[in-house]
Amino acid sequence: MRHGEWRTLDCRHGRALLHNNRTRTLLVWDPMTGDERYLPFPTQAHLEIVQYDGAVLCAAGHSDHGDCHWCPFLVAFVFSNHRDLITSACVYSSETGVWGEITSIHIRDSIVDASPTALLGSTLYWLSENDSIIELDLDKNSLDLIELPDDGFGIIMLAEDGCLGFARLDRFSLHLWSRVASIDGVVSWTHRRVIDLEKLLAPQVVAACMDRVGLAGYAEDANVIFIHVHPHTYMFHLKSMQIERLQRGISGWFLFPYRSFYTPGPGITTGGGDDQAELLYIS
């Protein structure tokens, strides 16, 4: 694997999903064991007018994903056609070695955005470019669209109540939403809280960043949000309300956390803290 040709799409359950746009190839990589599994793009996703994203997850069905290195895995691939505005998805199984049936949805401007995904139960979520969320139900093999609670750039995540969540930054104010069901079964967004990050950062950090602040990712297992505060990147632990700077600078915008038992090697940056979320980023 020549690292310069590959970019990260996702990282979950001890594996990373990378893509090579030139060769239209996906790579499922286990940083601990070194195992590499190369997959072709689904046939319908080879068009030049397609925008895509993907996710990798363990297929073993257990709840503890700390050591999934020898378990079967799934790769979910979602892609949008700019010409007909159809967004499609299909799932690859390492057990069968083939891509499954394609499911599609035709909603205006529902173009998938290349950003970190969220997994809740057996459902995956991606941001789209029209301020909505693309939902893939793996059990039903169906797509749906969810409106975001607020305009502007943000990230999807797991809320502290275990529901689907959304986070957005307004300068140093971190807004958190949760999508919950009411007594009568109506599901809607609830604005949970606002966290003033300016009170948690050193005054010199706030002064030096020139308001260049943005969200960079989320660690599902550790309940950690990654935040760019120019020129550095920080880990914000939602439970303890502690914030710490990453030890090394990282190129690119989104970060993909890696959480497993392994010995760090080239291309891996680690960050400490009680949650012990490790970062994997391949530039």
Image (tube, rainbow, N blue to C red):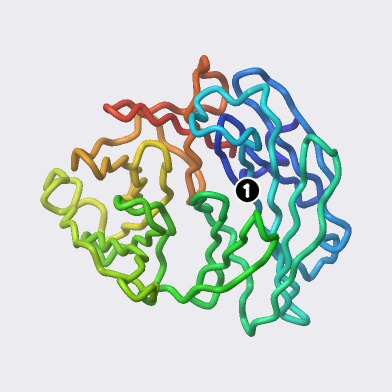
Residue 3 location, quadrant = top right
- Name of the residue lying farthest toward the front: 184
What is the secondary structure assignment of the residue under circle 1?
A: strand
* Residue 145 in the image, given as x and y percentages of width and height: 56, 73
Task: Give the quarter of the figure containing the C terminus.
Answer: top right
Query: Residue 94, position in %: x, y?
Result: 78, 36
**Residue 245: which quarter of the image?**
top left
Q: In the image, is 267 to the left or to the right of 85?
A: left
Name the residue located 65 percent from the left edge and 54 percent from the top edge. 138
Query: Could you tell me the amino acid type at mark 1?
Result: Ala
On the picture, is 151 further left or further right than 282? left
Q: Position of residue 93 (x, y in %)?
A: 77, 42
Q: Residue at x 62, y 81 (%)?
A: 109
Residue 16 lies in what quarter of the image? Answer: top right
State which quarter of the image contains the N terminus: top right
Q: What residue lies at 25% left-to-right and 59% top-to-bottom?
A: 174
Nearest to the observer: residue 260 or residue 187:
187
Q: How many marks?
A: 1
Give 11 or 173, whichever is nearer the viewer.
11
- Vertical arrangement, residue 60 with respect to residue 124, above or below: above
In the rendered image, which residue does mark 1 sit on?
A: 55
* 13 shown above or below 119: above
